[in-house]
Amino acid sequence: MEVFGRIYRLSRTMGDRMEEAYRPYGISRGEFDVLSTLRRSGEPYTLSPRQLSATLMLTTGGMTGRLDKLEKAGLLRRSPDPHDRRALQVTLTEKGLDVIDRAVGAGLAVQTEALSPFDSEQAGQLADLLRQLLSSTEEAGH
């Protein structure tokens, strides 16, 4: 209980800190996830709404809400898929690319600060232990 209590508290605390780090850029953690997924896809930073939903494990309705907000903010655009007239594609705008790059930097600064009590060896050990725990709990769940 002690270990998982701390994991839950850490998750909540870091989630709040990350939300705070993204706030100056006008995005939430969920919106960060959409923008960063597009960013990681590489140029031209374009995916279908279905690909985004599958990657982020969101319903299409949940994805539509996020896309609507991000499009209104000028961070992405939706356009017809040139290969399938029935489909759409979602593309980061220049503004979206700038926002996600700056938000990633802000998030990394928060994470670096949180790990500052550890030297690099300790941080590596923590990462290894958490990886093992995550792996074993995911395997046990299947």
Image (tube, rainbow, N blue to C red):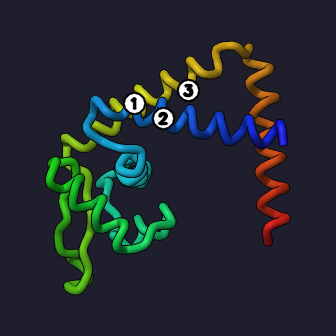
User: Residue 119 versus residue 18: which sits nearer the camera?
Assistant: 18
For the point 26% across and 69% down, the residue is 89
Task: Answer left or right for 2 relative to 16.
Answer: right
Quarter-wise, where is residue 21 in the image? top left
Q: Residue at x 61, y 39 (%)?
A: 11
Point out residue 121 in the picture as x, y percentages from the top left corner: 79, 19
**Which mark's residue is nearer the viewer, 3 or 1?**
1
Give coordinates of residue 131: x percent, y percent.
Answer: 77, 44
Q: Element type at marker 1?
A: helix
Q: Residue, x 33% and y 70% (percent of image)?
A: 48
Q: Which residue is mark 3?
A: 111
Q: Give the mark nearer the N terminus: 3 vs 1.
A: 1
Q: CA distance from mark 2 to mark 3?
A: 12 Å
75 lies left or right of 137: left
Residues packed near mark 3 inside 10 Å, few (<14), some (14 to 19) or many (20 plus): some
Q: Quadrant of residue 20?
A: top left
Mark 2 and mark 1 residues within 8 Å of each other at the beta carbon: yes
At 33% from the left and 51% from the top, the residue drawn is 43
What's the mark number on residue 20?
A: 1
* Of pointers 2 and 3, the one earlier in the residue sequence: 2
Query: Residues at badges 2 and 3 in contact (C-beta under 8 Å)?
Result: no
Disc 3, SS: helix
Q: What amino acid type should be assigned to the residue bearing mark 1? A: Glu
Location of residue 131 with respect to 116 vertically, above or below: below
* Camera-nearest residue between 59 and 54: 59
Residue 50, picture quadrant: bottom left
Seen in the picture, residue 120 relative to 33 is either above or below; the reply is above
Residue under label 2: 16
